[in-house]
Image: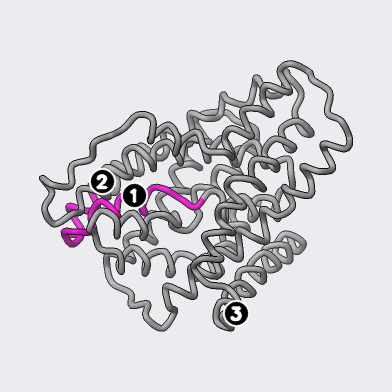
Amino acid sequence: MLSAYINIFLIFALMFMGYYLTYKQLFNNLVGDVFSKLVLQIALPANMFLNITRNFSREAFLELFNGMIIPLISMLVTFAISYVYVRLGKVSEGRQGAFSTMFTCSNTIFIGLPINLAIFGEQSVPYVLLYYIVNTTLFWTIGIYLIAKDHPQIEQAKVHFHPVQVLKKIFSPALLGFLIGVGWVLLNLPMPQEAATFLAYLGNLTTPLSMFVIGIIVYNVGIRNLTMNKDIFGVLIGRYLFSPLIVWLLGQWIPVPPLMLSVFIIQAAMPVQNSVPILARSYGGDQQYAAASLGYSVLIYLLYIPLLLKLIL
């Protein structure tokens, strides 16, 4: 338990380093964009491919996807609860779609992957990615549709889904790295040591660059500008109460390995997705509200994660 806390502290030390270096103007939004692309397009795919080929046999992988039903059901239920909360809690117009999306979808890669690695090690990575697949699919379909509906002129904000664009978002480089790794395992192909070493160098960039990005985001949101209101509080309830609780309840009904369930609970209880403030701005929604929700969710997570670990470990 102590080692897990120390590892988490080190992860967030990287985030605060990113925050401090942004304050000192060594980092900025452009640097954050470059880091994000490096993680999503290079480091993370290498990490995913290497972890699948190292940690799974053909037989073990075929059993892996049985657990995907838990994140799928849990997120659909959480979307439904967010809809009820919007009505009963009278969430302000112009932010209802962003509210439901932030209530339901979590930051499964930039924070979720480093935290799970810190707690459970590399054996958690396939389960992290299972949750990521469901989270990303629902975010770029249901989530983006709801965010678009926040536009003041709803009729002009209708989403016209372009299948190719949606597929590009879902089949990201990280997911492709995972799928190539799966094919490698299923075909029982050998892995040259030199290639594994090279991919390890790239994959090791994932955690530090991810946390630097979060630090840059928190700085640009502005801690002093954060003001709590009932709509932000509702997002925090969804992120840190309903989402993990529903996953845990489903885990009592649907038998899955203990590590898989623990990873799913951790993934469900992550801060808000980085992309929501950007999408809220693009679709004419309440960007300030989305950014404040993201900032609060990251900062409160520092206090929340030790309590969650106490409950599940």
Badge 3 local density, few (<14 within 10 Å), some, or many (20+)? Answer: some
Q: Which residue is mark 1?
A: 101
| Residue at screen point 59% across, 59% down | 35
Label 2 to label 3: alpha-carbon separation: 35 Å
Q: Which residue is mark 2?
A: 146
In this picture, residue 185 sits left or right of residue 78? right
Residue type (three-letter) at the residue carrying disc 1: Thr
Residue 176 appears in which quarter of the rendering? Answer: top right
Question: Relative to 92, does residue 48 appear above or below in the rendering?
Answer: above
Boundaries of the magenta span: 83-107
Q: Is residue 300 visible?
A: no
Question: Within the magenta stretch, is there residue 136?
Answer: no
Task: State yes or no: discs 1 and 3 in contact (Cβ < 8 Å).
Answer: no
Label 2, secondary structure: give it.
Answer: helix
Task: State yes or no: discs 1 and 2 in contact (Cβ < 8 Å).
Answer: yes
Residue type (three-letter) at the residue carrying disc 2: Leu
Label whose residue precedes the other's in the sequence (1 or 3)? 3
Label 1 to label 2: alpha-carbon separation: 7 Å
Magenta: main secondary structure: helix
Label 3, secondary structure: give it.
Answer: helix
Given residues 106 and 238, the one toward you in this image is 106
